[in-house]
Image (cartoon, helix red, strand yellow):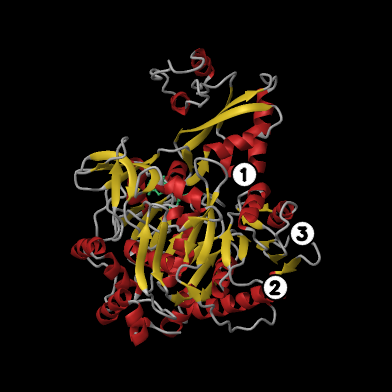
Amino acid sequence: MLSLHNFKPKIGNVTRNRAGIVTLKQAIKKRMNSRIRNLEEYHKAYQESVSQPEKFWAEIAAEFSWKKPWDKVLEWNFRDFNVKWFDGAKLNITENCLDRHLESRGDQVAILWESNNPEIHGRQLSYRQLHTEVCKAANMLKNLGVKKGDRVCIYLPMVPEAAVAMLACARIGAIHSVVFAGFSAQSLADRIHDAQCAYVITADGAFRGSKSIALKEIVDEALQQSPSVKKVLVLKHTAQPVHWQEGRDCWWHEELEGCSEHCEAATMDAEDMLFILYTSGSTGKPKGVVHTTAGYMVWSAYTFRNVFQYEKGDVYWCTADVGWITGHSYIVYGPLLEGATTLMFEGIPTWPDAGRFWQIIDKYKVNIFYTAPTAIRSLMAHGDAFVYPHSLASLKTLGTVGEPINEEAWQWYYDNIGKGKCWVVDTWWQTETGGIMISPLAHITPAKPTYATLPLPGIQPVLVNGQGEEIKGNNAEGNLCIKFPWPGMLRTTYGDHERCRLNYFSTYENRYFTGDGCRRDFEGNYRIIGRVDDVINVSGHRMGTAEVENAINEHPHVIESAVVGFPHPIKGQGIYAYVICDHLPQQPEQRKKEILEMVTKMIGAIAKPDKIQFVSGLPKTRSGKIMRRILRKIAEGDTGNLGDTSTLLDPAIVESIRDGALQ
Ligand code: WT7
């Protein structure tokens, strides 16, 4: 393994790729530590990232281990969308997550694991142990036939093996596609099919509070429709009985036995795919967001370092699941790249009681805690009596992610969990952005309730108005776009680059469109208002309205449906479904139950509508488009002024829906 710190550029490289090498030389000479330490440094870094982006990122990248340096820091165009960071470089991200730390912190805990059941002993893996486990697992995957470039689907509970499996894939150059273990067999099958995964890694079951979920059974069902899958590797976790298909299924512990602890890290190109992660959009099925190796590495590490200001010895805990991007970037890659101690929790916040998070914080003396507004609101609703018994004295930084945080929840978090002494970082980003984009830097840049505040160095946000023009100046509101590439941005959507271009780069010329509405205050702080497309954010999880409608429409008696979001006190947004059946149901409660079961089967329990209203028609324009604006107003209970309904095919339908609305 070559460290850039002592890398000497070859003459040949200089003549071939002059620009890149010059930048690299500067990088090596300066060896600047890219940790921002005060407000002045933030402004300086931000300015540099805009005025000399290539130089800026080369200096940061120089702090990692590369097998070969890059030829060119950045190449890009947003027209047909093609972005390359550190092109020509060779590396393996696991050498940066693991091998690089062995000398300096081999015995430090890398992963702390807290079981669902508080009575069961947790586990911990030092960097050395994690390195060994990853190498063994990588050899196990090789023995099973996994090759560089193969897609491996990971459908696991929150156990250390989930991180080991991801890193083992990366070690040998296989592309992981982690699917959240709450998704249904149908969703899993769709994702396996789209990525053409030949391998699935799962467990017999998962614990969630007092329940256990039969993961292997769900995989078996999904695989009835997945001819691409050759092998299923099963981790024994709950020890529940499982159905076994000889020749296809194999036990993790049996396959791991005898595997060597040494595994040479595959040499990857900077732009080789690292992983695919599915996320919902406003149309069609979820799309596989693709992240590549070098840019994602630099971005997840840089953002982790600066937003959370992790110091050696800190215990860091992000409560997300590895099935979401937050788990990828801020449980696994970001923290491990930075040599942090990252805590993984298998359970849920409310079991055995609503004090579980706070009990865990005291147990492990957590210093940095990162969770979702939904969890905060839900625990707040359970009452402060669950918080008081715990000291929470170790905390110094609190983070939130996934959805807008309302002022009341922000204040409760700050006062009751942070005891008025912790920084709150409200981090705005997306699956597509790979890492945090807009956020305070803990203890450095000011926090402001309900505001994600300032862009990180490298991020150039713009607000765009209805005419597609950039709104300059402060105290403005518009659609949030980003006008310059950053290392962690998505590169494509798997198997369909045109869909990616259309989704993100066609609404506004030369800009990445986030899908969010946003306000900029007098000081230039950004506040995310919420999605402006047909995406609902339920408890920090993205759901496409079309996806939920398609699931509802699978019910044999449903003719058509329309789904919108509405404000929900805990979840942020709830799902409201207007449903047309062939006949108005005789037993509406029974029909609702069946519809909920259908959605659970097609997507998963997280997509279940909170409210279902049976209607005889939907407000449509003459061209057949559903006017969701009206449906949203009715769902919000704001029926006083429904706006202009004159363009509707049948204006009378609005009154009938309004009269039947559920409140
Ligand atoms: C959407 C992205 C980022 C990981 C978790 C969600 C919303 C995210 C915030 C925030 C307001 C936020 C946006 C965004 N969102 N963070 N701090 N404040 N809204 O990732 O599933 O890709 O969803 O979540 O609407 O577009 P995701």
Q: In which quarter of the image is residue 516?
A: top left
Name the front one of labels 1 and 2: 2
Vertical position of residue 594 compared to residue 323: above or below: above
Name the front one of labels 3 and 2: 2
Residue with the mark numbered 1: 603
| Rendered image: mark on residue 144 | 2
At mark 3, the secondary structure is loop
**Residue sitting at 60 percent across and 18 percent down?**
616
Real-space Cα separation, disc 3 to disc 2, in angstroms: 21 Å
Vertical position of residue 296 compared to residue 657: above or below: below
Instruction: Give yes or no for contact between labels 1 and 2 (Cβ–Cβ under 8 Å).
Output: no
**Residue sitting at 48 percent across and 40 percent down?**
535
Q: What residue type is labelled 1?
A: Ile
At mark 2, the secondary structure is helix
* Mark 1 or mark 2, earlier in chain: 2
Q: Which of 39 and 94 is in front in this view?
A: 94
- Residue 10 makes an appearance in the image: no
- Residue 659 makes an appearance in the image: yes
Residue 5 placed where, x, y %? 34, 83
Real-space Cα separation, disc 1 to disc 2, in angstroms: 30 Å
Residue 30 placed where, x, y %? 25, 79
Q: What residue type is labelled 3?
A: Val
Residue 517 placed where, x, y %? 35, 40
Residue with the mark numbered 3: 242
* Mark 3 or mark 2, earlier in chain: 2
